[in-house]
Amino acid sequence: MTLKKLCAIYALLVGVIMILVWIGYFATGTMMGIKPEAPGLMFHITAEFATAFALIAGGAGLLANKKWGRDFYFIGLGLLAYALINSPGYYIKGGGNIILAVFAGSFVFTAIFAIAGLYIKE
């Protein structure tokens, strides 16, 4: 498997999983037993969907060998890095140590894939 394909799959998976997580939230009202409550939560959800769509576009673009694929890949990863730093604040009150660990681990993987993306050959 090529590095480009691996990066594309990561972006696609994370983008799809982000959408599925929010669908789960809308269906149940909680995420992993935590109910995030914040006045600006809808802005956060909108940003998360923008991140997911950028990741999906970037992953699809990489797989299709489109010139814009790499650009969207990095835009998506940048949005994702920000979300992974910002999002734990919505869950910290609920004592969500597990979800905080998921965010930290995801940030490490995102950093690794961002560095890997620098080595993608056109």
Image: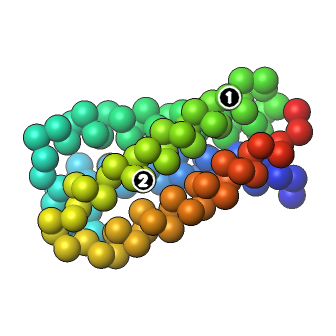
Instruction: State which quadrant residue 48 falls in.
Output: top left
Q: Residue 61 carries which label?
A: none
Q: Is mark 2 on a helix, strand or loop?
A: helix
Query: What crowding class fits label 2: few (fewer than 14 Cα within 10 Å), some (14-19), or many (20 or more)?
Result: many
Q: Earlier in the sequence, mark 2 or mark 1?
A: 1
- Residue 113 versus residue 6: which sits nearer the camera? 113
Q: Mark 2 points at which residue?
A: 84
* Picture layout, residue 96 above or below residue 67: below
Q: In which quarter of the image is the N terminus?
A: bottom right
Q: Label 1, secondary structure: give it.
A: helix
Image-quadrant location for residue 78: top right
The answer to whether residue 18 of the structure is visible from this angle is yes
The residue singled out by tag 1 in the image is 71
Q: Position of residue 14 (x, y in %)?
A: 54, 52
Q: How crowded is mark 1: few (under 14 residues within 10 Å), some or many (20 or more)?
A: some
Q: Is residue 118 left or right of residue 84?
A: right
